[in-house]
């Protein structure tokens, strides 16, 4: 089967670097203001919600000004989220319990929102398809809202096993994987909606072509699957250092492996067996369910060596 090539949008690298570095510096400056970290996280959540609404409006109206506005609001939300993360790091340092802001449930969810939004913007910037944002950004908003309203905001000292440099590299790699799978899920849902309503004119008018949705879903997974693989390997190395063994069949370890097997099967089916379209879109949807089980169900309801992430 012929490979569909998604047309790449020309990326102005100096401009992108300027925006990224300028935004990071702005976040550092804002974090020095006398506002607690939760204020910035709540502000980011509101920005994500507004961005989701504008992306949905853009999906329906297709006015370029709406698309650019949606992208700008999402970028603002990411800056506010980054500000909250920096501020939380400052506050943990002032309390004498410094740690990176991704060690408990609240921090992990807000970090997930930040990484997922960043990965999505990179894909949007590269391929120029803002319509996927109507399916991805609402997920980012709900993740952030769950953290704000359901998780504890308290800053707690790290348990001994977490006081390691592995916390910086293993967890970041894992969340890059979570983020890429989130973007892929949005693309797969959009594909299935277009397929289900293929006889409806609005589906053909408002959604990108199925070939584009299929290819962006694939690329999102192909990019982050090696990173997810690295996160499992790094986690095993950390486990050996902390607990004296590379693998202990902890529920989190098992489900991380299940996620790896699921998306590995997806890549195998698509590349080697030539599967396309509806079958692989459903594979991504069910694969994302395993991601949700890996993060939420295992952390919240199955105690194990990773149960510290429930706080």
Image (cartoon, rainbow, N blue to C red):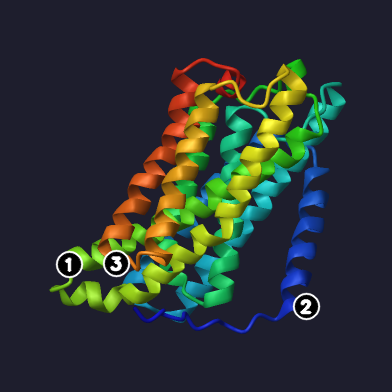
Residue at the image point whose x is 37% and y is 78% from the top: 62
Q: Which residue is mark 1?
A: 197
- Determine which residue is flagged by label 3: 277
Q: Earlier in the sequence, mark 2 or mark 3?
A: 2
Residue at 52% from the left image edge and 36% from the top image edge: 256
The numbered mark, 1 or 3, whose residue comes first in the sequence reads 1
User: Residue at coordinates 34% horizontally, 50% vertically from top-left?
Assistant: 285
Callout 3: SS: loop
Between 258 and 206, the one lying in front of the other is 258
Of 254 and 99, the residue lying toward us:
254
Dot in front, 1 or 3:
3
* Mark 2 surroundings: few (<14), some (14-19) or many (≥20) residues within 10 A: few
> Residue under circle 2?
14
SS assignment at label 1? loop
The answer to whether any part of residue 55 appears in the image is no
Q: Position of residue 77 (x, y in %)?
A: 60, 54
| Residue 89 visible to an observer of this rendering | yes
The CA distance from mark 1 to mark 3 is: 14 Å
- Check whether the beta carbons of the residues at disc 1 and disc 2 lie within 8 A of each other: no
> Residue pushed farthest front?
272
- In whole angstroms, how far apart are the C-alphas of marks 2 and 3? 36 Å
Mark 3: give few (<14), some (14-19) or many (20+) Cα within 10 Å: some
Left or right, residue 178 beside residue 242: left
Q: In x, y percent, where is residue 58?
A: 39, 71
Q: Are the residues tagged 2 and 3 within 8 Å (C-beta)?
A: no
Q: Secondary structure at mark 2?
A: helix
User: Does residue 153 lie above or below 170 as drawn?
Assistant: above
């Amino acid at each position: 089967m012929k490979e569909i090539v998604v047309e790449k949008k020309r990326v102005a690298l100096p401009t992108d670097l300027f925006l990224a570095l300028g935004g990071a510096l702005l976040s550092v400056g804002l974090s020095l203001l006398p506002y607690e970290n939760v204020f910035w996280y709540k502000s980011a959540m509101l920005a994500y919600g507004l961005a989701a609404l504008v992306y949905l409006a853009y999906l329906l109206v297709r006015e370029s000004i709406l698309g650019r506005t949606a992208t700008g609001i999402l970028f603002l939300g990411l800056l506010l989220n980054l500000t909250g993360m920096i501020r939380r790091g400052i506050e943990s340092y002032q309390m004498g319990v410094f740690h990176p802001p991704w060690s408990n449930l609240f921090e992990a969810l807000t970090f997930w929102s930040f990484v997922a939004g960043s990965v999505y913007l990179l894909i949007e910037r590269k391929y120029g398809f803002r319509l996927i944002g109507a399916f991805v950004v609402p997920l980012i908003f709900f993740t952030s809202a769950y953290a704000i309203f359901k998780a504890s905001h308290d800053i707690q000292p790290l348990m001994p096993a977490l006081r390691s440099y592995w916390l910086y590299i293993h967890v970041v790699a894992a969340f890059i994987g979570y983020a890429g799978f989130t973007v892929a899920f949005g693309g797969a849902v959009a594909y299935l909606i277009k397929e289900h309503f293929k006889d409806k004119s609005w589906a053909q008018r408002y959604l990108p072509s199925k070939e584009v949705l299929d290819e962006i879903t694939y690329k999102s997974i192909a990019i982050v699957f090696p990173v997810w693989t690295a996160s499992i390997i790094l986690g095993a190395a950390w486990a050996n250092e902390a607990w004296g063994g590379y693998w202990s069949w902890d529920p989190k370890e098992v489900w991380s492996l299940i996620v790896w097997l699921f998306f590995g099967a997806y890549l195998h089916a698509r590349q080697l067996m030539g599967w396309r379209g509806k079958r692989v879109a459903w594979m991504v949807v069910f694969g994302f369910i395993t991601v949700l089980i890996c993060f939420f169900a295992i952390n919240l309801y199955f105690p194990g060596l990773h149960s510290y992430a429930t706080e």
